[in-house]
Amino acid sequence: RPKAARPHPLGLPDDAYAHQRGLITKAEVRVVSLSRLRLRQDSVVWDVGAGCGSVAIEAAGLAVNGAVYAMERDGAQLSYLERNKAAFGAGNVVVVAGAAPDALAGLPAPNAVFIGGSGGQLEAILTGVFRALQPDGRVVVNLVSLEHVGEALRVARAAGWETAVTQVAVSQGVDTAGLTRLAAQNPVFVMTLSRPVRS
């Protein structure tokens, strides 16, 4: 069993993580996405397109007796992911170097899957995740384009899965000549997918 993560707060500020500028799941989106996964202490989690690992590390702090498999294909992002794993003592994060869906093969069946990036393979990734997910599992996908929202909805509905879509649009206060104005971040669609409840 992987070593458990150290406890840490949920929704840490973005600058708590080593990351390439702009390439991180923002704190507010991270919190909403993790809440939708409904993690347990013993959850097995897949983080597909893990990037610098902010979602994986905070998921590991919730699934303290489980494991988080963080998949990433980009070499620079893998470096940030390893640095953040070490900095946070996230011993239950297992780094998987490779591109999904191929990188999914052979991993333990998950209770929860977060998809933060698809590398143009969204349909194939969702299809593989639907096959692997445990019966009561949930999938959360972060999307920024309307085209990808449409694609994910089409794939999920064709498979008979229930879908829920939330748009997270956050504005933060910034200083302007001694006054405070709101600066908007790019909105993100948080899509939750689950198997229908059978009567």
Image (spheres, rainbow, N blue to C red):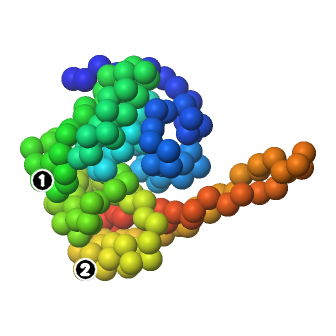
Q: Nearer the viewer, residue 145 or 197?
A: 145
Mark 2 burial class by Cα count in 10 Å: few <14, some 14-19, many 20+: few
Please say if the residues under marks 1 and 2 sit with CB atoms less than 8 Å apart: no
* 68 vs 164, nearest the viewer: 68
The quarter of the picture where residue 115 lies is: bottom left
Q: Amino acid at mark 2?
A: Ala
* Distance Cα–Cα, label 1 vs label 2: 22 Å
Q: Is residue 133 left or right of residue 32?
A: left
Residue 38, image x, y percentages: 43, 47
Residue visible at 23% across and 70% down in the picture: 123
Q: Is residue 89 above or below residue 46?
A: above
Single out the mark in the foreground, 1 or 2. 1
Q: Which residue is mark 1?
A: 102
Extreme-left residue of the structure: 106
1 lies above or below 140:
above
Q: Is residue 48 above or below residue 65?
A: below
Which is nearer the eye, 100 or 105? 100
What's under tag 1, amino acid-wise?
Answer: Asp
Q: Which residue is mark 2?
A: 158
Please name the residue shown 46% across and 32% down the image. Answer: 18
Q: Residue at x 53, y 66 (%)?
A: 166
Q: Is residue 174 left or right of residue 142?
A: right
Q: Quadrant of the C terminus?
A: bottom left
| Label 1 neighbour load within 10 Å: few <14, some 14-19, many 20+ | few
SS class, disc 1: helix
